[in-house]
Amino acid sequence: MNVPNTENQNKILVTGGTGLVGSAIQWAIRNVPGTFGKKQNEEWVFLSSADADLRNYDETKSIFDKHKPDYVIHLSARVGGVFENTSRMADFVRDNLYMDQNVLRVCHELGVGKVVSCLSTCIFPDRTTYPISERILHDGPPHPSNYGYAYAKRMLDISSRAYRQQYGCNFTCVIPTNLYGPNDNFSEGCHFIPGVIKRVAQAKQSKASVMVVPGSGRALRQFLYSRDLARVLIWALRNYDEAEPFIISVDPDQEVSIKDAVEMVSEYSGFEGVIQWDTSATDGQLRKTADNARMRALLENFEFTTLEQGLKETLAWYSANQGHIRGMDARKGGQTPRGLL
Ligand code: NDP
């Protein structure tokens, strides 16, 4: 089994290098020294869908042949909020299965030294006990709203293990919780934090005295800053060689309520109106606590960015990039996401 050799020049290829997580890795290799950032003997290449459609085997083979990577962080995926996941169930299964199978197959064919891929805590069994831990990943059906994405992602874990077992490939996965950060996707049906940022910005722009938010706000979530995930992924590429994926999350006592998160975004955005909770709307699952004990055993002293700082940085990026934000049509001013909670 190949393990990254830090003495030689290494080429690291990141699929999905222009997305939320990929751009956070780009930030880390520019700004973070040492263990969690770029090393001198490394060349990093970031792919977007414009470089190759990874759902297509020939395009995947051709772009990997061109770059000949030593190591790969595999992030490209079809990702979305609840509405997108539910309304495009077949697309989520097909696109994710194709991308993952092509990337792992080509990495095997080219003898790539290691692949670290991303799963998600939203693919865990729906009916389970909390906190969730890595060992129950396959122990029951996922939530009906995203079973296409969830089963495809579970197959990424299965496939990584199978390549390891049959061919000795050093393929592994990590399991991040709910992400947010600069360069998030703000399209209709986006994830929770970009949805709130957009909603608050619209309320502020229209000088609304009241902003209505669906749900009661009492559901609890662990929000992970994309730049923290980037640092852990870089560490994992160099240091983690097990088949078993590990959860990447802030500690369970860092869970915050949706109410707190909305109030923080409102305060940091300067929205001065009243927040009204529409309790007729669903809260979703009240709690989905993830256990990060395995990560803490590996990275005991890893310091996560506080939600306050992460939100402030994300909001600063959002203000500075108006007109260039993924999923937002500047002419329409964007649409309020349907899958807010
Ligand atoms: P994004 O949606 O922000 O980015 C997706 C990336 O994949 C983009 O670079 C996109 O390229 C690329 N891509 C999409 N389709 C194709 C294709 N057919 N061929 C080649 N490239 C393609 O995703 P995230 O950064 O949020 O997610 C990264 C990983 O983390 C994924 O595996 C995801 O499942 C996982 N994850 C995400 C969470 C979240 O909350 N966002 C939570 C937990 C896990 P382009 O820019 O050209 O469109």
Image (cartoon, rainbow, N blue to C red):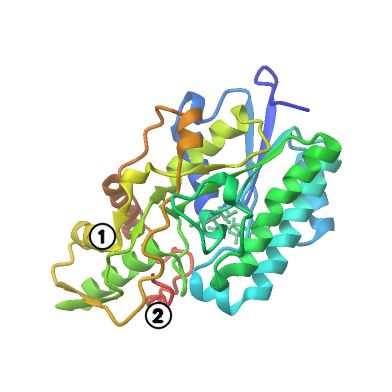
Relative side of 46 to 219, left or right: right
Q: Which secondary structure lies at badge 2?
A: loop
Q: Are marks 1 and 2 in contact (CB under 8 Å)?
A: no
| First-in-chain label (1 vs 2) | 1
Q: Mark 1 points at which residue?
A: 265
* Quadrant of image for the C terminus: bottom left
Query: Hey, what amino acid is under mark 1?
Result: Val
Which tag is nearer the camera, tag 1 or tag 2?
Answer: 1
User: In what quadrant does ligand 1 lie?
Assistant: bottom right
| Residue 130 seen in the figure | yes
* Quadrant of image for the N terminus: top right
Give the answer, above or below, for where 174 lies relative to 322.
above
Q: Which residue is drawn at 50% across and 31% down?
A: 37
Front-most of residues 248 and 47: 248
Q: Name the residue under label 2.
A: 332
Measured as percent of width and height from the top left, residue 31 is found at 44, 34
Query: Hey, what amino acid is under mark 2?
Result: Lys
Front-most of residues 19 and 154: 154
Relative side of 229 to 219, left or right: right
Mark 2: give few (<14), some (14-19) or many (20+) Cα within 10 Å.
few
| Total marks in image | 2
Q: Which residue is drawn at 69% across and 28% down?
A: 10
Measured as percent of width and height from the top left, residue 259 is found at 25, 63
Give the answer, above or below, for where 312 lies relative to 230.
below
Q: How far apart are marks 1 and 2 (CA)?
A: 22 Å
* Disc number for residue 230: none
Residue sitting at the far top: 7
